[in-house]
Image: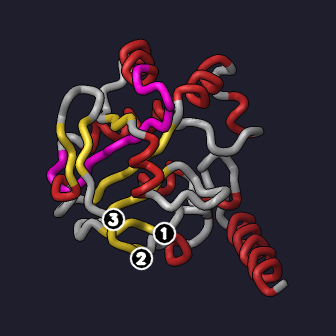
Amino acid sequence: MRSVVLFFSAIAAVLAQQASSPTTDSGSPLLSIPAASEELRFDSQLPSFEAVDITGRMWRLEDLRGKFTLIYIWHTFEARAVDSHNGRVREVIHGLSDLPEVQRFYDKAKRTKNIQVLTFCRDYDYTHASEYMKDKKYSFPVIADWVLIKKLFPQAPGSPPYWVVDKDTRLSSPVRTLSLGRVLY
């Protein structure tokens, strides 16, 4: 009950703030939540791992140390569903792929020294990821290993498909209140 009251209190505060200073972010009052409430928490150490991505590059936990890493977990079925509906179903079906946004962020991040992107495809048939990447001309790194995903990321029901790993290889708690765009910002 208390969390419901806090949620509606936060919404009321945001709406009041928005009325006095409207946002340009697609009109959503939730995008106006003050930054203090949007802090990522890094609660647990990411387990050690070793995996080869679809281009043949070996990834280890040590490759994430010293950088902030955006982790995005996706599935080709979800990505193709968004493609076939020109992205319009995103408003109705939660959790579908943001791969074009991930690609844009990757293009910017690869020119930096302290930010990187690593995605995981959870298809059971690992060949679908490379076919889809080639078809869409995406170039961000993809580890296609659904077993490894289960080991590394505590997938609570309703968790978004993205996480952040900090410079000390600690995994963020599930990002439930932020859109991918806000996490990237």
Is residue 114 inside the magenta stretch?
Answer: yes
Q: Is residue 17 above or below residue 156?
A: below
Colouring rule applied to residues: secondary structure
Which residue does the numbered mark 2 point to in the structure image?
A: 43
Element type where label 2 sits in the image: strand
Which residue does the numbered mark 1 point to in the structure image?
A: 173
The three-letter code of the residue at mark 2 reads Asp
Q: Quadrant of residue 64?
A: bottom left
Q: Is residue 76 above or below residue 2?
A: above
Q: Which mark is residue 99?
A: none
Which sits earlier in the primary sequence, circle 2 or circle 1?
2
In the rendering, at what x and y percent does residue 67 appear? Answer: 21, 59
In the rendering, at what x and y percent does residue 94 appear? Answer: 69, 44
Marks 2 and 1 in Cβ contact (< 8 Å): yes
The three-letter code of the residue at mark 1 reads Ser
Real-space Cα separation, disc 3 to disc 2, in angstroms: 10 Å
Element type where label 1 sits in the image: loop
> The N terminus is located in which quarter?
bottom right
In the rendering, at what x and y percent does residue 31 appear? Answer: 61, 58
Residues in magenta, as a range: 112-127
Residue at x 47% of width, y 52% of height: 150
Residue at x 21% of width, y 45% of height: 59
Residue at x 60% of width, y 61% of height: 156
Element type where label 3 sits in the image: loop
Real-space Cα separation, disc 2 to disc 1, in angstroms: 6 Å
Marks 1 and 3 in Cβ contact (< 8 Å): no
Q: Which mark is residue 46?
A: 3
